[in-house]
Structures are given as C-alpha cells and as structure tokens.
Image (cartoon, helix red, strand yellow):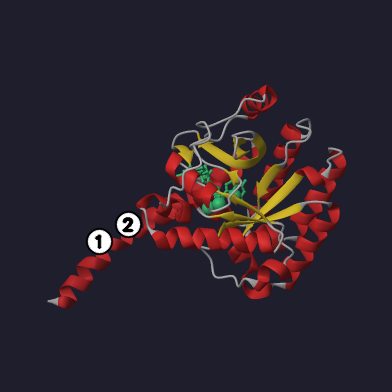
Amino acid sequence: SSKEKGRNCATFFEPEMDAALRMRRQMEVDLREALAQDQLHMVYQPQVDATGRIMGVEALVRWNHPTKGPIPPNVFVVLAEESGLISQLGEFTVRRVFAETREWVGLPVAINVSALQLRSPSFMAAVTRLVAENAIDARNYEFEITETVLLGDDAATRDNIIMLKQEGFTIALDDFGTGYSSLSSLQRFSVDKIKIDRAFVRNLDGGSADSVTLVEAIIKLAKALNLGVIAEGVETVSQRDCLVACGCEHFQGFLYSRPLQGDTLEQLAGSGQALGPKVAPTEDPRG
Ligand code: C2E
Ligand code: MG
Ligand code: MG
Ligand code: MG
C-alpha cells in the first residue's frame, strides 16, 4: 500500500538525510579551517582582444580539499553564504588578489563578489582597508557582480556599488542575460561592462540564427549604452569568429587559456605573446 511505501521511504530517507546533513556540517567545519589556514588560493584567467593580446584577467578562487580534492567554487561559495563565512571568504579573495597582482601594472584584474558580500558592511570595510594597506590603484580593479545582486533593488547594495565606484573600481555584470534583471538596472547601478554568459556563446556553435541575433543585440545594446562587453566561455574558433562578426572585441575562455597560477600568468602577460588561434579571414561565419 501507499502507506507502507511512505513508511519505507521514511526509514530509507532519514539516515540518508542525516548523512547529507552531517557531510554538510563537516564541509562547513572544513571550509572554516581552510580559511583560517590559508588552504584556498587564486587562479587567473586571461581576457584577450581580437588579436589574442591579454588585456585583463579574472581572478577565480580555488579550494583543494585535503581529502576530497578540488571543490568547485560554485559549491563552496554557496556554502560560505549559507554558513556565515562569506565575508571571510570575500576578504580572503580580495586580500590575496591585491597581494598577488599589485605589481601587475596596467593589467586590469576582475574579482567576483556575491550578492551577500556586496551587502556586508564588514566586506566593504575590508576592501577600503586593503586598498590602503596595499597602496592599490582601484582603477586597475573591477568587481564582477551577477544579476541576482541587482534583484530587489536593495538600497545597501546600491550604496555599496556607488562607494566602490567612487573609490575608482569598475563594475562588470557577470553572466549577463541569464538572470532576471531589467535592462534599466544597467543604468541604475552604473554598471561599466557586461559579460555575455557562456550559455549564449555555446549556442553559437549550433548554427542557430536566433542565438546570433541575440548575441548581436546584446553587443549593440552594450555599445549604445557605452558599456564594455566581453564574451565568456569561448571554446571554439567558430564561436570566436561568430562573436567577431557580431561586433565583439573582448574574449575569455578555454580557446585562449584556462585559469593559470599567478606567476605563470604574470610571465605570459609579460611575454606579450598572443593567445589562441590566429585571427580568421574576414568571412561571415553566418553566411
Ligand atoms: P564566473 O564568474 O562566471 O566565472 C567563469 C567560470 O567559467 C569559471 O569557473 C571559469 O573557470 C569557467 N570558464 C572559463 N572559461 C571557460 C570555458 O571556455 N568553458 C567552460 N566550460 N568554462 C569556462 P569556476 O572557476 O569554476 O567558477 C565558477 C563560479 O564561481 C564563477 O563564475 C563565480 O560566480 C564563482 N566564483 C569563482 N571565484 C569566486 C570568488 O573569488 N568569489 C566569489 N564570490 N565567487 C567566485
Ligand atoms: Mg566572473
Ligand atoms: Mg560569468
Ligand atoms: Mg557563472
């Protein structure tokens, strides 16, 4: 009977849920320890222009768990948000990025911040303090926020974005087009740049005319509003060629480089070497 089934489910799931909860708690303990013991580190992914020249980098956090191996940032950033560790994680990220990149003169560095970080007074205070401590020129740094940050039009978030901009930082809207923010929030939050989400870029390979139209429209919009625009998750030459035909001038993705250790990135950028395949002929890939 269904009653029996229900009971079976209950006895089956309870220990399971218990185990999941225990594992979660353990991960929380582990993350706390990782933060205290500096087990996290940063990697840097190049951003390039149409010739493959590095014109910036995005800093990405990594956690190599002592027994579980690498944990994806998507997983532990959420964990940090849910367990009150996000300010600490955010402060770690900014402190480490400033320390590692302050000598990379002229190479803009983007740092991801989550919605909760941007609402946190302690995170904001930490940024201001770390700028002073490291003699940072904020104009070389960009904060990447996601559209969910702009949802709900939170007053503290807006104030903090304005404060960061007054300090000289630029603001990029990450994963553009995947969230639910209205186009007017681009203006209301004084965003400087949009990052076209990987989902759109991926679809360009399917030969879908609609995807091309969409990407073209995003790029036109960005240019009309005087915003910078970069495509992320560029993996193939055909995606790159299609983006170029759509008017895109900046690119990030495995086609050019995976995220790299700081010293490797510094050497690569210093060499002036162009990344990725040679620029394609001026053939319209949509034709
Ligand atoms: P994101 O900011 O959109 O970062 C881009 C993600 O796409 C990175 O994943 C990057 O490694 C990956 N990626 C880059 N190029 C390609 C490509 O060509 N193909 C594919 N398939 N993937 C590519 P990652 O490092 O796993 O980060 C995932 C997300 O975690 C980030 O998405 C960001 O939202 C968050 N995150 C990463 N580092 C931090 C951080 O320091 N602080 C905060 N708050 N969030 C972070
Ligand atoms: Mg990002
Ligand atoms: Mg993104
Ligand atoms: Mg993302």
Q: Is the N terminus in the top left, top right, bottom left or bottom right quadrant?
A: bottom left
Taking the image as shown, residue 279 lies to the left or right of residue 193, namely left
Q: Ligand 1: does it lie within 8 Å of the C-beta at label 1?
A: no
Contact (CB < 8 A) between labels 2 and 1? Answer: yes
For disc 2, the neighbor class at 10 Å (few under 14, some 14 to 19, many from 20) is: few
Q: Nearer the viewer, residue 140 or 25?
A: 140
**Cα–Cα span, label 2 and label 1:** 7 Å
Residue that appears at 48% across and 44% down? 241
Taking the image as shown, residue 124 lies to the left or right of residue 7, namely right
x then y, percent, for residue 221: 62, 64
Q: Ligand 1: does it lie within 8 Å of the C-beta at label 2?
A: no
> Which residue lies under the disc numbered 1?
12
Check disc 2 and report its element: helix, strand or loop: helix
x then y, percent, for residue 235: 45, 41
Would you say residue 236 is visible in this rendering?
no
Taking the image as shown, residue 235 lies to the left or right of residue 17, namely right
> Which residue lies under the disc numbered 2?
16
Taking the image as shown, residue 148 lies to the left or right of residue 285, namely right
Residue that appears at 35% across and 52% down? 206
x then y, percent, for residue 255: 48, 36
